[in-house]
Image (tube, rainbow, N blue to C red):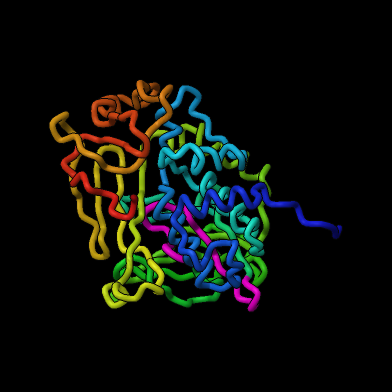
Amino acid sequence: MSGTLPPAAYDTSHITQFEKYVQLPEKYLHDNQPAHTLAYLTALHVHTISTIPYENLSLHYSETRVVDLDPQRLFQKLVTDGRGRGGYCMEVSIFFNHILRALGFQAYMTGVRIRLRKDGVPSGDHIGWTHMVSIVALPDGSQYMIDVAFGGDGATKPIPLLHGQAVQNLGPQEVRLVRDHIANQIHRTEASKLWIYQYRNGPEREWNSFYAFSEFEFLQPDFKVMNWYTSTSPDSFQRFTPLVVKFLRGKKDVDAGNPDSDEEIVGKRMLAVATVKENLGGRTRIVQECKTEEERRTVTAISLAPEAEELSFGRGFPPDYRQLPDCFQFRQEPRELVCRTSLAADWPPSMA
């Protein structure tokens, strides 16, 4: 069946708010009608992930613990409310897909099978559909995977849909897509091959696979099913692991004096359960374990809605997590999440 494509959920007023919120450079503002180039797509990606964090606090600090995927409510949560909130994969990815489509990009969404981590490393078989990415086609015919919500090991820029083409990610880390079957596939034909997102933390390291996806389009009802599992299943790590990942953007030293050069991702800061970590382009290091009231300092630029301020993490969770409420305190001031940590209070440097 042919016909008119479904419209994006956002209009020009949404786009204007978004561009201001993520501090998009003037040359890329939609009023200036920038060409749909890789540079433009990359700038949108970089400014989004360095402004809108990957986080799952709605599963830990809300009465309902419901993640709402309605695009209008996502825009309000991520932009209009001005609280520095983010979301987990389906929230930010659906939001960003509608942004891209409103800007005229050819973009659609597809589901992703991830591998769970063991000792911090993805291991074992790929599990069911629990993540999502967008696939974007540029006017020159090139295609890119866009992933703005995978957390700490996510792509920091668009990744070409080309077999084996390595792309520099953060610091020494390289990422790439390879087209192959995954280990637990039975039906193995050329057509059934998947795109597999791989990484290695240096040229001397082995490549390891993180997730896999096809080019089959997923629709909003598909993500509602996936979202139900990730937000309610007792097997979903999201329900037991509070996470915040904030990417940091800046210019390379060689471009620092060039006002026309674009910013890129230069680091990341993460809060995983009670541990604050940092990576400024090299190795990830632990900044602080959240333990005492005296250590409380600003960690990320997030604040919760007033009705969520008094909620404590740990209701209905295993006993091992019940000590965590004392590690998470929230202030009423906009854009401020406070954790008991000695992390320097001038973070994040990219935020006004």
Direction from residue 137 to residue 167 in the image, left or right: left
Asked whether residue 150 is drawn in magenta, I would say: yes
Residue 320 percent location from the top left of the image: 28, 28
Residue 334 percent location from the top left of the image: 37, 35
Question: Is residue 346 at least partly visible in the picture?
Answer: yes
**Quadrant of the rendered structure where residue 290 is?**
top left
Name the residue rendered at 43%, 48% in the picture.
52
Residue 132 percent location from the top left of the image: 55, 52
Asked whether residue 332 is drawn in magenta, I would say: no
Name the residue rendered at 62%, 72% in the picture.
138
How many discs mark residues in the rendered view?
0
**Quadrant of the rendered structure where residue 105 is?**
bottom right
Name the residue rendered at 40%, 22% in the picture.
316
Question: Is residue 125 at least partly visible in the picture?
Answer: no
Looking at the image, which is closer to me, 305 or 290?
A: 305
Q: Main secondary structure of the magenta part?
A: loop
Residue 200 percent location from the top left of the image: 35, 68
User: Which quadrant of the figure contains the N terminus?
Assistant: bottom right
Query: Start and end of the magenta stretch?
Result: 138-157
Looking at the image, which is closer to me, 119 or 88?
A: 88
